[in-house]
Amino acid sequence: MIRILHYYVNFSKPIQERSFYQFYSLTFNTGYISRTKMHKKNFHLKESDCTIYFNDSFSHLEKIADKSKCILLIDKIVYKKHTKIFRGWEIILCEGGEEHKNQKTIQSLILQLISIGANRETILVGIGGGVVTDMAGFIAGIYMRGIRFGFIPTTLLAMVDASLGGKNGVNAEVYKNMIGLISHPSFILYDKRFLSSLPNKEWVNGFAEIIKHACIFDRTLFKELQKNHLQAYQHDQNKLDKLIAKNVHLKMKIVQKDPLEKHERKLLNFGHTLGHAIENELRLSHGQAISIGMVAAAKISKNILNFKETDEIIALLEKYKLPIHHRMNMERILPIMLKDKKSNGDTIDYILLKSIGKGVIQSLPIPRLFSEFQNVPHAVLH
Ligand SMILES: NC(=O)c1ccc[n+]([C@@H]2O[C@H](COP(=O)([O-])OP(=O)(O)OC[C@H]3O[C@@H](n4cnc5c(N)ncnc54)[C@H](O)[C@@H]3O)[C@@H](O)[C@H]2O)c1
């Protein structure tokens, strides 16, 4: 018996791929001494639905979710700027900003949930930028093994990117988003009034992700951004609505096709491999870090894929007041980059461009990546 067990159990394979005999042995291994033959059955687990309420109002939340069950996890600055509208709701406040996106904050927020009696019926609503929505989704995914949750994004970056797609988590020191899970909010509600208090630098950060979407998916959007400028979107509600909706659709289309980022969803990481490595190390905002990451990726695309439009990308990033270079020590940055979730130790899936609007996933051997970065520094990383 023991020999059979050793022979058949192969834990390296995912459970669906284990054969009938492997299941038999597995059952034995877990202590049920039974010789009954097991049959194999697949259970298809449907992704949960996410409803997006565009151009809506915070007051609609009462109609979407039972107020008596809701706990709002609100960014402190957002709460301070918009206190009145939150009257009558159960609230926990938390700090936005990357330095707070860690396990210590999660622990403290979970203890607060326990102390106010949150239970499995609770609906957690994350209200803030990407830091708060990433943490709210993570907490909802693990609190009592998972509770319902929704988002009300309050930064442009969270509206066009961070609140979408179900990736939730926190950093482990300088390593970005190393602890987390994928689970989708039941709803995302957009109330643009929150943007009235958003500082200009945070608008700029949002445009980094918008330019990213244009670079990898949509040349028409890229041209639209070239013709416009930041203030045009800040002052024209209609233009802004369309821009937000366009970006939501671009992201959700790819998330629907590849929810677990096995294939084309990886394209959304354009600029993020270097970006994530420098964000915490150089204390840059997320938008600034990926802006520099996109310039590096465009330059590498030029070397590897003969990409010819690097200058257009640099000009667009500069137009939207995003940085295109930063002094950095590659001997410190490269090892952080190798810990990226897209690296398997030998190669890294780097996102490059064939042309504007056409991103590609390029598996680069690590030594090649190192030599590519040796060519980049003078132009990007000074
Ligand atoms: N989950 C994803 O798919 C995904 C995608 C992109 C980015 N992200 C994450 O998002 C984070 C960046 O998000 P962010 O740029 O929104 O950062 P953030 O949440 O730190 O917000 C930026 C700053 O704006 C403040 N703020 C938020 N809303 C405000 C408002 N309406 N008025 C005034 N101030 C306001 C916050 O307090 C904070 O100081 C990063 O951690 C990044 O990793 C996640």
Image (cartoon, rainbow, N blue to C red):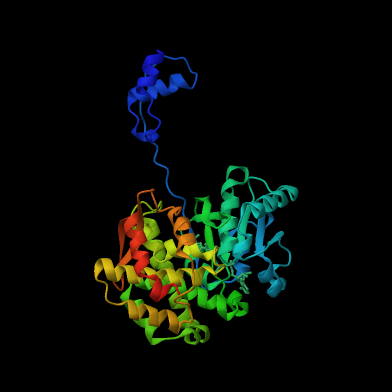
In the rendered image, the residue lying farthest to the right is 115
Relative image position of residue 93 (x, y in whole percent): 70, 62
Asked if residue 341 shows in the view, the reply is yes
Position of the N terminus, as image quadrant, is top left
State the count of labels: 0
- Horizontally, residue 13 falls left or right of residue 208, namely left
Position of the C terminus, as image quadrant, is bottom left
Note whether 283 is above or below 362 in the view shown: below
Q: Nearer the viewer, residue 368 or 237?
A: 368
In the rendered image, the residue lying farthest to the left is 306
Relative image position of residue 226 (x, y in whole percent): 38, 84
Relative image position of residue 350 (x, y in whole percent): 35, 60
Asked if residue 216 shows in the view, the reply is no
Note whether 376 is above or below 229 in the view shown: above
- Horizontally, residue 233 falls left or right of residue 261, namely right
Q: Nearer the viewer, residue 364 or 368?
A: 368
Note whether 59 is above or below 24 in the view shown: below
Q: Nearer the viewer, residue 162 or 50?
A: 162
- Horizontally, residue 155 falls left or right of residue 26, namely right
Relative image position of residue 45 (x, y in whole percent): 42, 43
Residue sitting at 44 percent across and 19 percent down?
Answer: 28
Q: Where is ligand 1, by quadrant?
A: bottom right
- Horizontally, residue 219 falls left or right of residue 96, namely left
Residue sitting at 45 percent across and 86 percent down?
Answer: 229
